[in-house]
Image (spheres, helix red, strand yellow):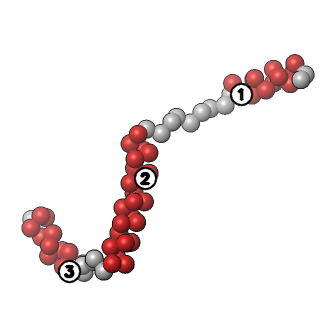
């Protein structure tokens, strides 16, 4: 290998900026959101849904 080429490669590598590693929370969130969507889709397919009106009525005691 040509020494000049090796020096150039080292110089190029010194300018590379590495992305910070994701935190545990970010990794957990990236898994949790799709899981929630999947559970919601399963609930819809199984018929475990309520109308908006019924949901508002059920939540009234929590939101007042």
Upstream in sequence: badge 2 or badge 1 = 1
The disc label shown at residue 31, or none: 2
Q: Nearer the viewer, mark 2 or mark 1?
A: 2
Q: Position of residue 48 (x, y in %)?
A: 28, 77
Please give left or right for residue 13 compared with residue 50 in the image.
Answer: right
Image quadrant occupied by the N terminus = top right
Query: Measuring 35% from the left and 69% from the top, which residue is drawn there?
Result: 40
Q: Residues within 10 Å of mark 1 (few under 14, many from 20)?
A: few
* Above-or-below relation of 8 to 31: above
Upstream in sequence: badge 3 or badge 2 = 2
The residue that mark 1 highlights is: 13
Please give left or right for residue 19 compared with residue 32 in the image.
Answer: right
Q: Residues within 10 Å of mark 2 (few under 14, many from 20)?
A: few
Residue 58 lies in quadrant: bottom left
Q: Position of residue 20 (x, y in %)?
A: 52, 34
Q: Position of residue 24 (x, y in %)?
A: 41, 39
* Above-or-below relation of 57 to 25: below
Query: Measuring 12% from the left and 70% from the top, which residue is drawn there?
Result: 60
- Do the residues under discs 3 and 1 have CB atoms within 8 angstroms? no
* Above-or-below relation of 2 to 51: above
Q: How far apart are the alpha carbons under marks 3 and 1?
A: 60 Å
The residue that mark 3 highlights is: 53
């Amino acid at each position: 290998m040509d020494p000049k080429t090796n020096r150039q490669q080292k110089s190029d590598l010194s300018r590379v900026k590495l992305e910070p590693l994701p935190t545990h929370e970010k990794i957990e969130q990236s898994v949790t959101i799709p899981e929630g969507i999947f559970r919601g889709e399963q609930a819809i397919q199984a018929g475990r849904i309520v109308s908006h009106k019924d949901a508002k009525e059920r939540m009234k005691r929590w939101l007042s």
